[in-house]
Amino acid sequence: MNGEPEQESIRLAMNQAWQDHHHTRDQTWKALQAELVICAGVIGINWQIQSFWLTVLSGILLFIVTLCGIQITLRHRNKVELRKFTHIMNCEEALGLHRKDLICDVKKPDPIFFWDAFRPKKGNTALFILRMHIAIWVFSILFIVWRIYSLFR
C-alpha cells in the first residue's frame, strides 16, 4: 500500500456521504410537512373554534415554525449539502470517475440565499422547498393581519 486509501474505503465514504445528503434532504421535507400540518390546524381552528386569541396564537406559531423551516432549508443547503457534495466529488475523483465517458462537467451545487426564491429562472429542489416555506410564511402573516383586522371592524 502506498499511503492512498483503498478503493473500497473511498466507496464506503462516498456512500455514507450520499446517505447523509438524503437524510438531510428528508429532514428538510419533514420541516415543510410540519408547517403544512400546522397550517391546516390554523385553518381548522379558525373555522371550528373561531376564537380570536386561539387563532392569532396559532397563526403566530405557524409564523415562527416557518421561519425555522426557512433557516433549516438555507443551512442544510449552504452548510451540509455543499460539504457533502465536495466530499462526494473528491471521492469520485479519487475513484477516477470524472471522465467524459462517465461523469463529465462535474460542479458543486451553488449556495442559495433567501432572495433566490424570487428569481424564477433559478431552480433546484432546495429552492423549491424554500419557496414553499416562504409561501406558508406569507400566508401566516396575512392570516394574523386578517384576524387582527377582523377584530376592529
Image: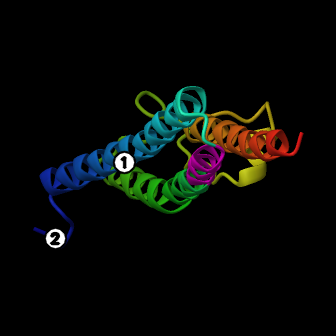
Q: Residue at coordinates 16% horizontally, 70% vertically from top-left? A: 2
Asked if residue 37 lies left or right of residue 18, the reply is: right
Along the line of sight, the residue nearer the viewer: 41 or 130:
41
Q: Which residue type does callout 1 highlight?
A: His
The answer to whether residue 14 is above or below residue 37 is: below
**Which mark, residue 2?**
2
Q: Residue at coordinates 49% horizontally, 55% vertically from top-left? A: 76
User: Residue 92: x percent and y percent?
Assistant: 35, 47
The answer to whether residue 51 is above or below residue 40 is: below
Assess whether residue 58 is covered by the magenta stretch.
yes
Dot 1, how many residues are within 10 Å of its Cα: few (below 14), some (14-19), or many (20+)? Answer: many
Q: Residue at coordinates 54% horizontally, 53% vertically from top-left? A: 65
Closer to the camera: disc 1 or disc 2?
A: 1
Dot 2, how many residues are within 10 Å of its Cα: few (below 14), some (14-19), or many (20+)? Answer: few
Predominant SS along the magenta part:
helix
Q: The C terminus lies in which quarter of the figure?
A: top right
Which color scheme does this rendered protein use?
rainbow
**Which mark, residue 116?**
none
Q: Distance between the Cα atoms at labels 1 and 2?
A: 31 Å
**Which mark, residue 21?**
1
Assess whether residue 9 is covered by the magenta stretch.
no
Asked if residue 6 lies left or right of residue 21, the reply is: left
Asked if residue 108 lies left or right of residue 21, the reply is: right
Of the two numbered discs 1 and 2 on the same chain, state the one appearing first in sequence. 2
Q: The N terminus lies in which quarter of the figure?
A: bottom left
- SS at mark 1 in the image: helix
Q: Which residue type does callout 2 highlight?
A: Asn
User: Residue 72: x percent and y percent?
Assistant: 51, 56
Specify start and end residues of the magenta stretch as a single range. 52-63
